[in-house]
Image (cartoon, grey):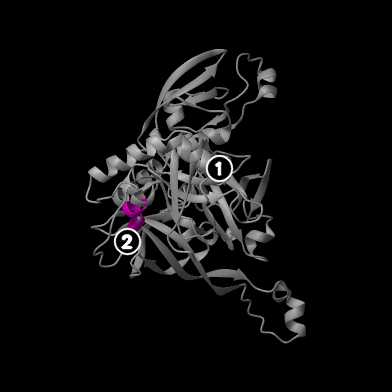
Amino acid sequence: MTVVTARAAFVPLLLATLAAASGAGSVEAQLPARVAGQEFPTLAPLVKQVEPAVVSIATKGTVSAPANPLMEDPFFRRFFGFPDQQQRQRRRQVQSAGSGVIVDAVKGYILTNNHVVENAEEIEIVLTDNRSLKAKVVGSDPGTDIALLQVENPKGLVQMKLGNSDQVQVGDFVLAIGNPFGLQHTVTSGIVSALGRSGINPDGYEDFIQTDASINPGNSGGALVNLRGELVGINSAIFSNSGGNIGIGFAIPVNIAKSIMNQILQFGEVKRGLLGVSIADFNAESAKAFGIEGTAEGALVQEVADGSAAGKAGIEVGDVILSVDGQRIKSASDLRNAVGLKRSGDSVRVEVLRDGKRRQITALLSEVATAAQVDGEDIHPGLAGAQLGNHEGKADQFAGPGVLVQSVEPESPAAQTGLLANDIIVSVNRIRVRNVRELQQAAGQQSLLILSIRRGNRNLLLQIR
């Protein structure tokens, strides 16, 4: 956008907003000075009000890194006299920087992105007055990329008021505040370019606010602020081929961030809602095959889990889900986002197309099982070397629950049976499994396991002895 045009367009609104801000709250801001006999618009009073609530975040930690692949070759080790003991993983130190927003000055709570603090062993917060404070992770949610921190001995902090992101409209003026490229407390401005963006991270739950306010590396976790000085989003990602800003940035709506924060504080984890269906995109080709007229978009129900929220509500295989709580569903990923951003126990209104007729169904969402990592050897000797966790429906080809093979050690029993990382186990000995707990129950004391595996867009069977 051009600065001249933008200023000319919003001078009356801006002056009215600044005047309101100067008369309310504890911050006293003066109206802009006159230039050439006219009031000159400025965002300085607004920035002074909200900037102390934005902090820079520096982290230190270690991550696993693969060893040299030559070290995995037994011949290579014997030839050069290396010990036969394999060390497949090594640790390396990592550092990262980002931003955060103080949302509770008394308790010292700070919202930021999960990717800013993941793998962090030390977290340092730097305030606008250059004070440095230690912080810890209270909880995080990789699915929405939200993390909640808490600083030690919170004194003299300033918090930002939380807005209502449901009221944000395309065309609203916003500020992005953060620490791009280590340049602390940088402020940029722009407008809300679009709402409800998804498809940025196929493994995440997304409902992004898009903005042309400049967002660059280091802005992650920073504030997207409206002209009332309210937090409306947590800056999270950019669309760029070069790594720098090209006018397309994305922020997590504050209502989602607030919901994640409240769940972390209340339960110690995120209790994500689960409908209990396997789905696929419904498009014009699907409509033609089904002989359905009037719609060429939605999520086609391929499977309904026994005892699931969908099953109890009366959703059937072959239904086309058109909307959830009035939110239009255009694809399978839309449905996963719409449900995954809600809490377990929430009641949702689902509109389905069945036999050419639209029906309204109310479903009470169940809870996604905790995705704890389990060693396959604890379930069956033939699974030794595999790390298993719960699958929450993040794959493009398979959106139902199951057991995700997170990693497989080379030459391990699991690897020798043909199991691969990112395989999804959906049944054992013809018993449907939706999480690690059900896999453990189904495996029991069985000597032979016949696993039904989803690999990409293929189904296959593996025998585990």
Residue 343 in view of the camera: no
Q: Residue furthest front?
A: 36
Counting from the top left corner in percent of width and height, residue 265 is at: 30, 51
Q: Amino acid at mark 1?
A: Thr
Counting from the top left corner in percent of width and height, residue 403 is at: 54, 48
Kindly indicate the quadrant of the structure image that contains residue 258.
Answer: top left
Q: Residue furthest bottom?
A: 81
The residue to which callout 2 is attached is 150
Q: Main secondary structure of the magenta part?
A: helix
Tell me if label 1 and label 2 are in contact, CB under 8 Å: no
Position of 406 with respect to 458 (left or right) is: left
Q: Which residues are magenta?
A: 47-53
N-terminal of the two: label 1 or label 2? Answer: 1
Q: Give above or below for 274 relative to 313.
A: below
Kindly indicate the quadrant of the structure image that contains residue 421.
Answer: bottom right
The residue to which callout 1 is attached is 2
